[in-house]
Amino acid sequence: MSSKKLLIKNIEQESRSWGITAVPTFVFDRKAVVQGAEAPEVLATEIKRVLAATEK
């Protein structure tokens, strides 16, 4: 198996271990996940929440 295929396979396995089942899925700093098409405001809220938690 080529190194690119192996990398993709590893990423797929890691994604499944996080419970990702939808496309698109947004993962923020491995602390928050938003699955499916969401409004920009939803994504912005999660980004702000993760940033606030990271700054503490």
Image (spheres, rainbow, N blue to C red):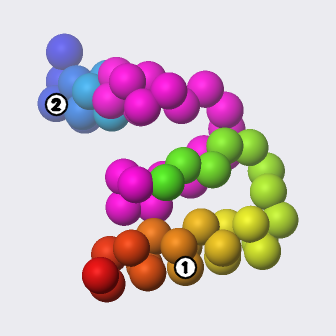
Three-letter amino acid code of the residue under disc 1: Lys
Residue 4, placed above or below residue 55 = above
Residue 2 has which mark? none
Q: Which mark is residue 48?
A: 1
Number of other residues with Cα within 10 Å of mark 2, as a class: few under 14, some 14 to 19, many 20 or more: few
Query: Where on the picture, by quarter, is residue 40?
Result: bottom right
Residue farthest front in this picture:
56
Residue appearing at x 79%, y 57% in the figure:
38
Q: Does residue 23 show up?
A: yes
Of residues 11 and 31, the one nearer the viewer is 31
Q: Is 37 above or below relative to 45?
A: above
Q: As shown in the figure, which amino acid type bears the numbered disc 2?
A: Ser
Nearer mark to the viewer, of 2 and 1: 1
Residue 12 pos. (x, y %): 39, 27
Q: Please indicate whether residue 26 sits to the left or right of residue 6 in the image.
A: right
Is residue 12 visible in the rendered image? The answer is no
Q: Which mark is residue 3?
A: 2
Percent position (x, y) of residue 29? Answer: 36, 61
- The percent coordinates of residue 11 (x first, y second) are 33, 33
- Could you tell me which residue is drawn at 44 percent across and 23 percent down? 16
Q: Which residues are magenta?
A: 12-31
Sequence order check, earlier mark of 2 and 1: 2
Residue 56 percent coordinates (x, y): 29, 82
Q: Disc 2 to disc 1, how far (Cα)?
A: 36 Å
Q: Is residue 15 left or right of residue 10?
A: right
**In what quadrant of the picture does the N terminus appear?**
top left
Q: Are marks 2 and 1 in contact (CB under 8 Å)?
A: no
